[in-house]
Amino acid sequence: MSDARLPPPADMSDRAFLAGMAILGGSYVVLIIALLTANMFHTSFKDLKLAFQSEQIQYAIKLSVISCTVTTILALWVAVPLGYLLARTRFPGREVVDTILDIPIVLPPLVIGLSLLILFTTIPGKAFERVTNQHMGELLTYFVLPLVTAALIAFGCTRSTLGRFAGTLFGAPVVALILHVSVGEALAETLQDRLHTRITYAIPSVILAQFAVATAFAVRTMTVTFQQISPRTEQVALTLGCSRSQAFWWVTLPQARRGMLTAATLAWARSLGEFGPILIFSGATRMKTEVLSTSVFLELSIGNLNAAIAVSILMIAVAVAVLVLMRVFGLRGASIV
Amino acid sequence: MLEVVNLGIQQGKFALDGITLRVPTGSYGVLMGRTGCGKTSILEVIAGLRRAHSGEVLLGGRDVTFLPPAHRDVGYVPQDGALFPTMTVAEQLGFALLVRRAPRNEIERRVQELAEWLEITPLLDRRPQGLSGGEAQRVALGRALSFRPRFLLMDEPLSSLDEATHGHLVRLLQQIREKRDVTVLHVTHSSREAGDLADVMLRLEDGRLVEGGR
């Protein structure tokens, strides 16, 4: 019987193992850096300045910023209730709804654009377009404006009677009534004149196309956010005298602030990057439905490589800024893409 | 009187059946049993946070089986305290009164009163993240009692505390017991706590309730 101790196992393999992992993974990091630097080296400050002085590109920047922001607000309006319902309630067909909400993430963006176009050739789609084209003023004055006003009052004065009334079902209709007996008609006419619009091939289509995709990501984020919030705090709020909606407003939603910020950032970034659906549903009309991603395509298609790269660099800068912002707010841990 | 008649609760793998218990008005009831045997579920049903599939809950002679938690006049201290992460201690203590639309000076008065009794006055402006276990449990207790409910449900309120804090909290609970203006059901797995506090001792074993008196 030999009690001789065996020599310890060789440890050279550890370093080789880590080196191998680094080379495999590192090649992707190198690819990303190479893509970015290639762009930088192909252009100069002069080219960039020239590109940004173009009227079309300035319009595209404006439209991009405005449409992305509007899309983000709309996406949050949908994602917060949906995320809450999916995380907190069990309703029949929940799994089906969950799967449906994943479709825009998985579907090719071009297909979404085409589907939107087709939707607006159907009867309900055409009816909707008729409203925005011919009844926009009334829609805004008696529907949208009252809702927004009531919501703002409810948020701004949560503890006063006025705020509480505004938050009920009667808040918005009362505002609508007040408008009706005062400046309603004149307001509706002005708004109709200024804001009536078609949907397809016009600015609203850009927002709708971005919304169709960005919301799916926002809903995913909000669902995870609400799942991570312990339902215990809500339950305690119920025992302390809250209804479910009060518990939601006072206890759950404040805890969801970070998640909402993440969802908003994701939605905004995704909207900026949307190209396919916008191309099909809104067209690529300069000075009308052109956003930054469309600009790259248009500049490229007329052979203006420098301008295309200039816009690309702008979008890269925005993307990096968004990432830095998410890290600064410590949001990365709470988000899934 | 806190009363539960023939309660049947189904949750995942386990089921409780025919649970009947009574805690006389103003008494301190302690429910014991091994961890995971359903004590928390019973509390949740009494508080209205969970539906039982059979049986009734009667609080003060009133059948509250189908009433929402807000209308049951029950204070609830869950196992981990579950303080509201975005509110200060003062806001948490005043929350129940705020929801009931009490005037501001009354809320402030009640918050001061609770803070003094619980000895947490220096903590009033702090957020829950900076509180120790014992401090958090006291805030949770104060929050549950802030609106002077007639019933108090506590789920293992002393389980994660060190000796000194444990003693302090037991003294607070004994004060509640002596005042006799709340009917308490205190869930625990420690028989020592039961000995220190209980007027009525109840034990949950193998899905059935076994009573022991004092």
Image (tube, coloured by chain):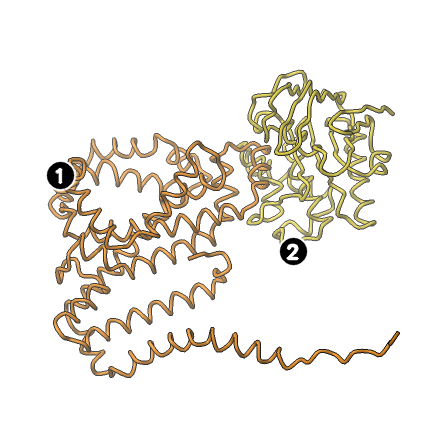
Q: Do the residues labelled 1 and 2 touch (CB within 8 Å)?
A: no
Coordinates of residue A296 in the picture (x, y in percent): 21, 68
Disc 2 residue type (three-letter): Gly
Q: Is mark 1 on a helix, strand or loop?
A: helix
Q: Residue beneath label 2, please?
A: B130
- Asked if residue B125 lies left or right of residue A152, the reply is right
**Is residue B113 visible to us here?**
no
Q: Mark 2 lies on which chain?
A: B
Q: Nearer the viewer, residue A38 or B181?
A: A38
Q: Looking at the image, which residue sits at the far front? A: A1
- Asked if residue B148 lies left or right of residue A157, the reply is right
Q: In this view, does A183 lie above or below A26?
A: above
Q: Chain A is drawn in which colour?
A: orange
Coordinates of residue A166 in the picture (x, y in percent): 37, 35
Residue at position x 71%, y 32% from top?
A: B39
In the rendered image, what is the letter of the chain coloured yellow?
B
Coordinates of residue A335 in the picture (x, y in percent): 46, 57
Disc 1 residue type (three-letter): Arg
Q: Residue beneath label 1, please?
A: A130
